Image (cartoon, rainbow, N blue to C red):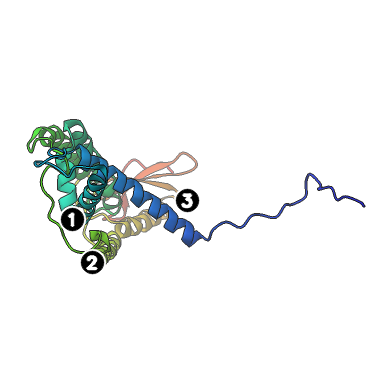
Amino acid sequence: MIGVVDHPHARRPRLAGPPRGERLRRERTARDLRRRAALERDAEAGPGAGPGPAGGPVGEPARAAWRRRQADAYLALPPWARAWRTWRSWGPLRRALAVLAVAIAWTVAALPLRAGGIATYRTSEIGFAVIVALAPVLAALPPRRRGRFADPIPVRPGGPWGRGRQALILRRAGLGAVLAGAGVLTWLVATGPGVDEHGLGRKTTAHHLADGRTVREAVARVCPGAAPARLTWLGGDRYRADLPGGGRLVVDAATGRPERPVRC
């Protein structure tokens, strides 16, 4: 009998893994289990959670069921109530870091507004400075640090809040608001009123494109036959055109006239 020897470079058949949808469901289930375990630990460590008349039940089976009920009650709360309990459970350092994260998010969110001429760099800078200045104030203000399960949680019928009808309505409303905001932002970037970096008037993408055509026409009129120039916005209606041969001229896009001196 002749045996078959696998070639070292032969392609071996791949083992079929679980479908993508099933894998995502497993990962989501694992995340939910880890979250519930963390909530049950917080409930066990919370003030007034000790066994006895003033705390939870006595006995491990009863306490395990009590911890599960506490986690279910917490997950049934709306997100703003959970956020408030989480904020109260943090210390000053975590609160300050959270406010600083909001400051960074503000800077990132202002980038498309600045690119469209709807906001200036100073707007982004002032907003960042204000939020950073509020960080130590919000970190030191009451309420004092307390656990998420320090106050009794009202028991609500049904499962977690995120799977209810109210959550679905809010998610749809939020998605609609995001899409509407994106549409409005796109319209403002293209045609809407904006301000330039020096606060001298409207400067959106559409305005810069129109100014660029005016400046290039002025360059072609003053320097016939010159290669395409590289334009730099100087603020307001003034643009600098740098020619490949070393020439340079500044053009006022409002009048279409170059300023002196002109070097072609």
Nearer to us in this view, 204 or 108 = 108
| Mark 1: amino acid | Leu
| Mark 3: amino acid | Pro
Q: Quick check: can you spot residue 132?
A: yes
Residue found at x 34% / y 51%: 32
SS at badge 3: loop
Q: Up-down: is 149 above or below 28?
A: above
Quadrant for residue 149, please give it.
top left
Kindly identify which numbered label has been placed on residue 77.
Answer: 1
Of marks 3 and 1, which one's residue comes earlier in the chain?
1
Q: Up-down: is 139 above or below 183?
A: above
Closest to the camera, between mark 3 and mark 2, is 2
Q: CA distance from mark 3 to mark 2?
A: 49 Å
**Residue 135 at x, y percent in the picture:** 16, 35
Residue at which label 3 appears = 228
Residue at which label 2 appears = 173
